Amino acid sequence: MRLMLVGLTAATMAVPAAAQQAQLRPDQQVFRALYKELVETNTTVSSGSCNLAAEQMAARLKAAGYMDADIKLFPGPAERPLDGGLVATLKGSDPKAKAILLLSHLDVVEAKRADWERDPFTFIEENGWFCGRGVSDDKAHGAIFTDTMIRLKQAGKPPKRTVKLALTCGEEGGPFNGAKWLVEEHPDWIAAEFVLNEGGGGKADANGKPVSLAFQAGEKVYQDFTLETRNPGGHSSRPRPDNAIYELANGLVSLARNDFPIILSDTTRAYFTEMAKISDADTAMAIRALLANPADAHADAIVSRDPGWHSTLRTTCVATMLDAGHARNALPQRAQANVNCRMFPGESVEKVRGQILERLGNNGITVTPRASENPREAAPPPPLSDMVYGPAVALARKHFPGIPLVPTMSTGATDGRYLNAAGMPTYGMPGRFGMPDGNGVHGLNERISVAGVMKERDYLHDLIVAYAGK
Amino acid sequence: MRAALLAILIALSAAQAQGQTRQPGEPAFRALYKEMVETDTSLATGSCTALAEKLAVRFKAAGYGDGDVTLFSTPEFPKEGGIVVHLKGNSTKLKPMLLLGHLDVVAAKPEDWTRSPFKLIEEDGYFYGRGTFDDKAQAAIWADLLIRLKAAGATPKRTIKLALSCGEETTYAFNGADWLAKNRPDLIMAEFALNEGGGGRYGPDGKPQGLAVQVGEKTVQNFWLEATNPGGHSSVPRPDNAITDLARAVVAVNTHEFPVQFNDTTRGYFTTLSNVLPEPVGPAMKRLLANPEDRDADRIVSLDPTNHSVLRTTCVATLLEAGHAENALAQRARANVNCRMFPGTDPNALKADLEGVIGNAKVSVSLKPPVRPLAKAPPLNPAIIGPMRDIAARHFPGVPVAAMMSTGATDAIFIAPIGIPVYGAPGLFLDTDGNGIHGLNERIRVDSLMKGRDYLTDLVLTLANK
């Protein structure tokens, strides 16, 4: 009803509201109501409440039969009290089987009503799309995972593995990160053999036609370094042989010239193996040569022509900002550069720092890692094991016939970095086909295909059931 | 002081070993100097106007009437004011002389300094603080002298004019000397002016080595080097990169040496030096004078950064800025290249030279305004140079005085065009390390300041009475 009222504008009047709404199965209608409630609860860092969203999901879990003891609602810290979340546990039947964790973040990126065509916090269905902030990132997962927990409970007989659900706040840059807090303060609540998370997905073409599915196993780690040179400086009318700017510039030229060594993980090896199958003959030959011998510079040169592949093959470090000098007529006393690194999973900050120093070839340049939210220990890349990857492939064939499933390593970061670092391999789930325009994720008018999210739900439900074991 | 002017010089006349008496009133001078150094007059955080007003109070207390003291500033730049003071002379024939100084100082970041830059700290025989040398040493000496003369009721033959202005250190700031020359030339008109830009230098042994009077100077020209790029997300670096293009260009400019040039002043300067300096420098200077393309001779002479700069146009990158976010590839990277052009150099020809040196069409080179007129070289007037030498012989026996071209620029470029020849006065000695002028931990030897005050007092009184 509310949907109709909100949609009652001149443009939508002509279309009967009923015609806009897809025909749904009864279980899908229940899911839709849960999803709607989650999206319509504002969880932005500026004006939202993750607590409220967590309480709503807790109420639904309890209505499905979960006891108070199965659900831990936790508030945010004193300075961010509304940044809380929940952990729910469905106890498995096999005490020897390890748990699995479903992880999703409740918080969403800011959305200004004035900039959006529609109210970002009203769940709108229109022409086959759900629209609203968070319909994709990350409330589709939050709703599917919560809905799956409800269905597992209602099925009566528990699965073999214990299934845990963690809904947290602060993934999108808020000051308090719930996933990090759980890892540090309550690792027992979330302990699991592996974790299902965002970061995977799939690609569709501009018309929405599915092209490929992505199974994310591993993500590069963001780390900034400050490079600095100092010099006594002096008057610019009397240049001295040594100079802070030239020392830094020489170092940056050298850093840019010397790529970091190639590293292949299970994931990227599988990724390039898939890519070789769909590449032209020369590129395919180079990919195969590189997989056989990562030191093959000629093959590297061909494969790395694609900047995305170049980055997937190695740690990258690139100077993104410069700041030097204090007056036009004075020799610089200090020159600084920010070097932004995307570290290959498993590489430590200290190792990458050493690799930068090696490339600079000048001990006069100091290299200091900037403070970051990253875990202290380098996260090993999650293994592409049959236990996790196998069912994902098998069920993809059933649910998305003809669409290849490609393991990927992402260059961006999710909360998976905290869980990977804590020894819980974390995987980004396939099932959602992003269009080339990005579907408004983090931007305006975020949207997701109604039919698409329903298929994703079916796939992930079956996958979780398969992982949990009967 | 834009010019760091210093060299080893020639003995021209026999030294007169004559003891000098210290000028009286040192406590009052120290108090004045301390107030000047401790008043922040940097462009970003300070106020020249505030210092000019403090000085006006001192001048009036010494007996100057309202008509003798002119405070000036413009509504657009209320903090960048200055002061002009007149001590009237009694001669109807002799024209006024002008003492020129600047109140402003180069910015100083306290976090980079060992001591507070705006606190006068005396330590181990040095005064530390921003402006202790450039230019508050000479400016304080000028102001102190005019205060003492008035308080003593002295009347020189020439009218002595003092102009202390703002904006000398910052190319794009309001320049008080420029403003006076264009708007109030009557206030500063004089037969000649004494300014910063001269000085003296201690040798590596710490003893006075030479004194210099500045006659002529190189011209400043700033250039922007700019590289642009479509940029993108930093997780996927592209093969071309604005920062790398700029870094390569900056390295190329650094590696390039402009050709050796001589003019009359510098040829005379190096000729005399070549006769007194030992192996290998003296003979190398002779070879270089004979053949400016003698690379080996150039290398030997240019080991001294000042010689290196006097011999040629120099260009050095002084500022870098690039990028708009840590996690984005830079769309623009820029460097300021500060060139000191040998007199007679065409800025557009130099731009073409830089483009050739960089050799990358993706890095643009542009001339940054202002493009200033070439400074007029004042004549080597014996009526001025003579007393400078004679008085130096008494105060600094055995220390030679020579005329030389400055590698930097001073406010002389604004004063010279209205017909006032400007001379950089000798007197204040620099150490071989450059004393942190424009840099960190600026300092002056207490002894250099006091002896400079004695010398400059004698010099001004002599020039004002003949």
Image (tube, coloured by chain):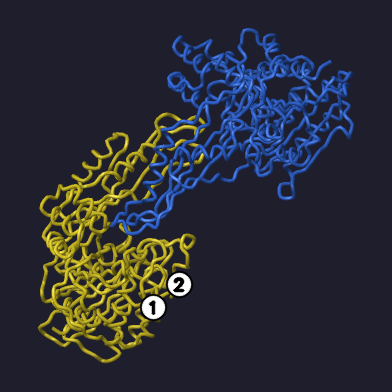
Chain colours: A blue, B yellow
Secondary structure at badge 2 equals loop
Mark 1 burial class by Cα count in 10 Å: few <14, some 14-19, many 20+: some
In the visual, does B47 lie left or right of A11? left
Whether residue A117 can be seen here:
no
Placement of the C terminus of chain B among the 4 image quadrants: bottom left
Mark 2: give few (<14), some (14-19) or many (20+) Cα within 10 Å.
some
Q: Which residue is mark 1?
A: B54
**x and y percentages locating residue B140 in the rendered image:** 33, 77
Q: How many marks?
A: 2
Residue A231 in the image, given as x and y percentages of width and height: 40, 54
Kind of residue at badge 1: Lys
**Foreground residue among B71 and A276:** A276
Horizontal side, residue A439 vs residue A39: left or right: left
Q: Quadrant of residue B343?
A: bottom left
> Is B21 above or below relative to A353?
below
Give residue B62's position: percent from left, percent from top.
33, 87
Residue A370 shows which numbered tag?
none
Query: Helix, strand or loop at disc 1?
Result: helix
Residue beneath disc 2: B119
Q: Left or right: where does residue B4 sit relative to residue B15?
A: right
Residue appearing at x 16%, y 48% in the figure: B294
